[in-house]
Structures are given as structure tokens and as C-alpha cells.
Amino acid sequence: MKKIMNDPSNVLDEMLKGFTYAYEHLLQRIDGTGVIYRHFVDKGKVALVSGGGSGHEPSHAGFVGQGMLSAAVCGEIFTSPTPDQIFEAIKKADQGAGVLLIVKNYSGDVMNFEMAQELAEMEGIQIKTLIIDDDIAVEDSTYTAGKRGVAGTIFVHKILGAAAATGLSIEEIKKIGDRLVPHIKTIGVAISPATVPEVGKPGFLLGEDEMEYGVGIHGEPGYRREKIKTSNEIAKELVTQLKAACQWEKGQHYAVLVNGLGATPLMEQYIFMNDVQNLLKEEGLIVDFKKVGSFMTSIDMEGISLTLLKLVDDEWNHYLQFPVVTPAWG
Amino acid sequence: MKKIMNDPSNVLDEMLKGFTYAYEHLLQRIDGTGVIYRHFVDKGKVALVSGGGSGHEPSHAGFVGQGMLSAAVCGEIFTSPTPDQIFEAIKKADQGAGVLLIVKNYSGDVMNFEMAQELAEMEGIQIKTLIIDDDIAVEDSTYTAGKRGVAGTIFVHKILGAAAATGLSIEEIKKIGDRLVPHIKTIGVAISPATVPEVGKPGFLLGEDEMEYGVGIHGEPGYRREKIKTSNEIAKELVTQLKAACQWEKGQHYAVLVNGLGATPLMEQYIFMNDVQNLLKEEGLIVDFKKVGSFMTSIDMEGISLTLLKLVDDEWNHYLQFPVVTPAWG
């Protein structure tokens, strides 16, 4: 394992220290915890809280800021944050109008956020929870019953963050979320695995010329392993899978996210974006919003994911373009 | 070589297609060239143009936009752009108040930008050129007489971009640049090399447990190779080198840039930022501006660079914080 780091067992704390230092004008950390919260307080408006295991930087703390998350809870690497820390985040985030929890569908996350919700409700804070399960690669997985939550989660942060900023109630925001989530579909591919610092070796192995379709962001198994293909062939496979999942028709409007998985250079992400562009054009889709970059990573995994969001509501596109001030949305 | 790409000889064109597609709301490409220019025209104000070989994404095209570059010229991978393309960029960028060229100190770039300057002057466009040589690692290098230009270049884009946006004349902007550049110092370290797609193998080799101090962004040799050290030890070495170069004193104000070299996860960049923070605090420096991310990369090199800019003028910090709309500054 070759990494720029110190003690492998202290990665989370050091990383959060460096992160909060870099962005101290926007956010801070509750000392001794993995809770990052924004300085900006939007009194009387709904607050959004997300989180999960770390190792997916810049997710989720990179989306804390004006117009997106009020707080993020960072667990240990690939490990759900504890209910008490999520509870702390909720209390810190609450601006008096309730807190919406945005949770990727992993059994540990779902359970711990649920326990935190109960603790918060006992304190009289109004809470709703939205589970994200955008990964269409496999049905159940190593840490998940049902589909996994992956990169599409950042579209939820962005759209509901804007909805909250405009002053909608928690019921209204939850309703948008319930409508939105089924329209977000993601699928990824890995060409090399991730190494958890404390483990010291890759979570799975791929041959020199192998790649795997459908790998999860913790290295969970995908659906097919084969010789590495060209960007265009990979794009074709992913778009074909997404087409089946979205059941799109010509002329429909979409948002597209090309997401690097951690060690994938922008050069490759741009090339892949170009292949996706051509395929979606052939399909007759109208792409109103695009984003490319490493937003939901798997430590140092090399690979890419493709997210499509069917814009069945015009407002979602407005919300995607609503101005924000966060470390990572840009 | 494991990369998400198609034809290794067509990387530049496909990459620029994907990039301009992703950011078509901000910029466009002169067809058939490596010239990217912004939609936004600030009539009567000075325009900034930069560029160089590709492989450093998001540099430089990612800094094209309101408040930074008017245009960027993207050469083939690690290859200087041609004078005719630079000339095209200058003509497209000119807003009637002259064009400042920002050039990293590589012999090919310097020569080709100089030839383009002559072509533009013959057409009556007022041109000035600023050479960036922030890399303190070595004196001369493979493609350079004198010091190399590296990540500190983005501070120049940002500060002079803001100066241009406020309406300063080309003489005034050049004067700021001349004062600014000697105060920018960078040094980097690689823990694994970059692979140019058309070459198909790494530009240099490092053992399983080796790293190299002072490597250039095209894999040019550094000044010492040794067993890989901890983030804290690497930070100490780089800060010590920078201290000698900057000759800083307690209480002086600085801007800091921690820059990933392409395949370095944010996790490691944040950890390194934390170590840098602690060292600069010990030194008694006041850090007014910090930035962390992969801004000046070397394709898929793993490693990091550290840039320090002595803020001898308050205005530089204001300019760093001046709002921009570009793909990559954030």
C-alpha cells in the first residue's frame, strides 16, 4: 500500500482536521466527532443532514454549505457513523423547521440513522428520512438489502438543498424527494480496486487487463468481469443498462453525472463523458444538466460511474442550477 | 497501461469534446483546435490567455471563465501548443484592451508563445507575457532552462484574472504579475509515475516502497529518491525547502495550495493539508487563503505538491477571493 498518510488507524481524524482547516470559512467540526456543520444558519428553514462511512470524499462533507447540506456525519472508513453522532449532527443542523436525513441504502447506515431519528424525535425535532438506492447494478449486495446508494445521492443533496433554501416545508421537501429518488439511476465500473488504509491491501483483485462492471463504492461485487474495454464500449454497456432501468423515450429530459471513483484522472472522465454524450444523442435524449468530476469516490479506486436523472419536473433542473457555496459542488 | 479511453493517439480531441460538452454553458472550442474560450466577453478589459501541453487537467482550460482566463490553448499531451493555435486564442480572447499571456517556464512553451506574440503584435494586438517558474525543486530540468512552472500558476490565473475583471490596464496587470511571480514557490513529490497514453508505459519507475522529491509535472527528475515516508515527514521536507526559498519570518501572511497530481485521493490531500497546517503554525505564519484539490496534475501520477505564496500585498488576497465562474476554481 502506497499512500500519503501517517497512522492508518487515525486517517479519519487527520483527514477531517485538514478538511475543516481548508474550509474553515464555510464549516466546522464538532470536536472529537465526525460531524461537520456549516456556519451559515437559515433560520426557520428545513435542514438537510447526510453522511455515512468515510472514503467517499468529497462526499458527504464536501456538500455542506449554503444551498445544500446543513451537516454531514463522517463515519470511519467504509463504516456507518454511530447513532449518537448522527443525533449530534441533527441537533446542530436543526434550524427550527425540521431535519431531513438523506441516507444511502446500506443496512448499517439505515439502522443507525433510524436510531438517531428516534433520539431526535424524543427531543421534539421533526425528522424525515429519505433512502437513496440509485445503483442499478445488482439487487442485493454485501452490505445492502435492496439496491445500493451511490453517486446519484449528490443530485438529491443538490435538489433538496435548493428546495430547502427556497423555504419549502419538510413535508413538501420529503414529497419532492420521494418523487425524485426513483428517477435517479447509476451504474459504475472499476478498473482497479480500492485499499482501505487500516486493511493495507486491496478489497478485491483484478487482473492486469481486467475490469468489473457494477462494482459498489466499497468494492462490493459487480455483475460481470471481463477484459478491459474501450471507453466507448464501457459507455455503451452502461448506457444500455441505464436505458433498461429508466425506460426512456426520445425527447425526454435528463441530467447526467460522470463520476470518477477516486484515482481516475479528469482526462479519462472527459473522454468517457464524450462517449456518453454521443450515445445519449443517438438515443434522442435532451440533456439539460451535466456534471463531471470525482464526487462519490471509493478511496483510490480507479473507475467511473454514470448517473442519469430523468427530469420529469422542470423544477428539478432549476434546483440543480441554484447557486450554492460548498467545498465540492463547484 | 489501464485507462478508460479509446484510441491513445486521439486522447486530446476526445477529451476536449467531453470537456466542452460538460461546460458548454461557459465556454466553447475553436473547431479543430485545442483553443477553449469563454462565452463571457468583458469588452474593453484585458484578456488573459494561458496554455501548454495537455495532461495537467483541469489546467488550464478548467480556469477559462468569468474572472480568470479568457482562453486556454491545449497542446497534445505534454507537448507545447503550436504558435498558430496560440495566435488563434489571442485573437479570440482580445477584448480590445490587450492580452496577457501566462506561460509556464518550459522551453517549447516559451518559444511558441513568443512566436504567437509576434504574430499578434503584427496585427496590432497589444501583448505582454508573464513566465511562471514557481518550482523550486531543481534549477534546470529536462524541458526547461531555469526553474519549471507548475501548480503555482493557478494563483497567477486567479489573481491577475480578478485584476483584469476590475478593469486594470495591461501595464498595471503585468506590473502586478512581475511582483507576484517571485513570491510563488512550489515543490512536489511523486509516489507513482504518470503514463502518457501514446507511450503506454510510465515515464519513470519507482520501486514498490519508493518516492521521489521534486519530480516535475511531466515526470522530470527530482532531487532525491528514498523509501516512502509518512505524510508528516513529507510535509516537513517540503516545508523546509519552501522556508529556505521564501525566507519567511514569523507573522508573515501566506496563501497555501495543496495540489493532487492526478490519481491522489482527496483523503490523502486532506491528511497532508493537516500536516502542512501544523508545520506552518509552528513557523508562526498567518495563512489567509488555502486551497486543496487536484488542479495541476500529471495525468495519473500519484503525488502531491505544496505551493506557498507570500501575500506581500493585501490586494492579492482580495483577488484570490474575488468571485469567478469557471469549471475548476470552484
Image: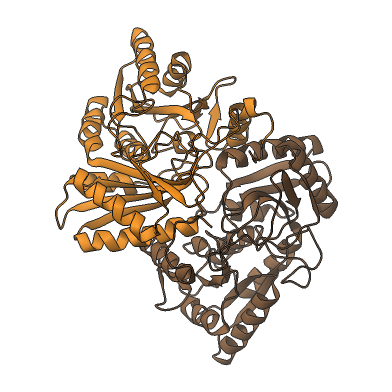
Chain colours: A orange, B brown
Where residue B173 sits: x, y (%)?
64, 69
Where residue B217 sits: x, y (%)?
66, 60
Where residue A139 sits: x, y (%)?
27, 32
Residue A208 visible, this orientation: yes
Identify the residue at image location x=71%, y=36%.
B275
Task: Farthest residue to the top: give it.
Answer: A122
Task: Farthest residue to the bottom: give it.
Answer: B122
Residue B325 visible, this orientation: no
Numbered-mark total:
0
Identify the residue at image location x=54%, y=91%.
B123
* B282 over B67 or under it: above or below: above
A65 or A304: which is nearer to us?
A304
Quarter of the picture containing the N terminus of chain A is top right
Determine which quarter of the picture holds residue A180: top left
Where residue B51 sits: x, y (%)?
57, 70
B296 or A36: which is nearer to us?
B296
